[in-house]
Image: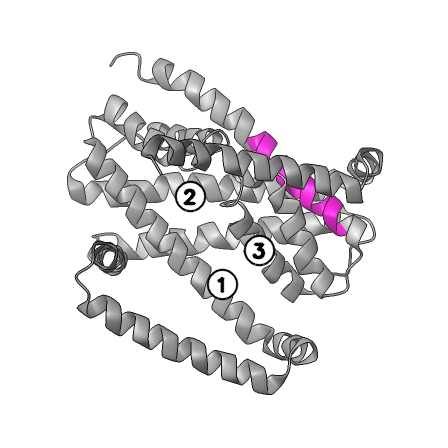
Amino acid sequence: MSKSILKILKITLPILLGVFLIWYSLSKLSFQELLGYFKTADYTYILLGVFFGLLSHLSRAYRWLFMLEPLGYKIKLGNSIMAVFATYLINYTIPRAGEVARASILTNYEGVPFEKGFGTIVAERIADLLMMLVIIAITLFLEFDFIYNFLTEKFNPTKIIFAFLILVIAALFFIFYIKRSTFALAIKIKTFVNGLIEGALSIFKMKKKWAFIFHTIFIWSMYVLMFYVTTYAIQGLNPIPFGAVLIGFILASFSIAATNGGIGSYPEAIVIAFLLFSLPEDPSRAFGWIMWTSQTVMIIILGGLSLLFLPIYNRKK
């Protein structure tokens, strides 16, 4: 398959999936019913969730300064903030294009070479991946009994143990094969994994590593808090177990990678998580749409303003 076709598929498939999931979601909860939930929602909690989301984005922009400083670049905080919001907005059009645009903004307005700016973004994503793994581990620890009981109810325990052992053996075999293989794909995988390890270890070599770690924890704490407080905005959804919040947050976070900005996929991921805890389907789906819409509106407004004001803010250059 040619590279041009692959590029087209990378752009069109997430859009088509998003359109299908929007249709599916509205077939389960009509637009009029969804609008009713929007009208009766408590916007105090929605605005509070937006505020926590805003804090996480500002913290991300400030954290970026710690990564650029060791490279010899002291950029303006204003440029960092606007580049971050522009990134989120552009990712709604073409997945992952925002990261390229973010590094380009730094090159245009701060003189940071593109490859260096993009390298810091990759390292940043590694830190975020580690935090997501930590949240997953915490969720597994807190909800171990629930997850275990759910799996044993749905599947035979003996089969689960057998499948787990097969996965472990397969993983060990795969690691052994990749280490010794000289195929191009194996080399790419080794390079990627080594890059992840190197990027993670580079965090501890920063001058302000503890500040970086603090902001990383703060960013993801705000993400979870943003998700949690917004659940109180929907009538008929509370009380909601904290385990449902964590699992819903994890699935919703992964859904953002499935479609552009999580359009269509974000609400349905939340429905899947909340149904595991026997929460009502319609309020769960409405919460997903309200959660996604509130954060998206913030990104559209602040991302659009950032793209407009970047040349004004840097008019001397």
Residue 59's tag is 2
Residue type marked 3: Leu
**Is 174 above or below relative to 67?**
below
Residue type marked 1: Ile
Mark 3 vs mark 1, foreground winner is 3
Q: Is residue 171 left or right of residue 134?
A: left
Q: Residue 166: percent from the left, percent from the top?
A: 44, 79
Q: Residue at x 40, y 37 (%)?
A: 96
Q: CA distance from mark 3 to mark 2?
A: 23 Å
Q: Are marks 3 and 1 in contact (CB under 8 Å)?
A: no
Q: Main secondary structure of the magenta part?
A: helix
Mark 3 vs mark 2, foreground winner is 3
Residue 135's tag is 1
Quarter holding the C terminus is top left
**Is 106 above or below relative to 313?**
below
Q: Residue at x 37, y 13 (%)?
A: 312
Q: Residue 204: percent from the left, percent from the top?
A: 24, 59
Residue designated by label 3: 251
Q: Secondary structure at mark 3?
A: helix
Residue type marked 2: Ser
Examine the image and state in which quarter residue 217 appears.
Answer: bottom left
Mark 1 vs mark 2, foreground winner is 1
Q: Secondary structure at mark 2?
A: helix
Does residue 227 show up magenta in the picture? Answer: no
Examine the image and state in which quarter residue 62 appears.
Answer: top left
Residue numbers of the magenta segment: 284-298
Query: How would you rate the neighbour count of disc 2 (Cα within 10 Å): few for under 14, some for 14-19, many for 20 or more?
Result: some
Residue 47 appears in the picture as rendered: no
Residue 264's tag is none
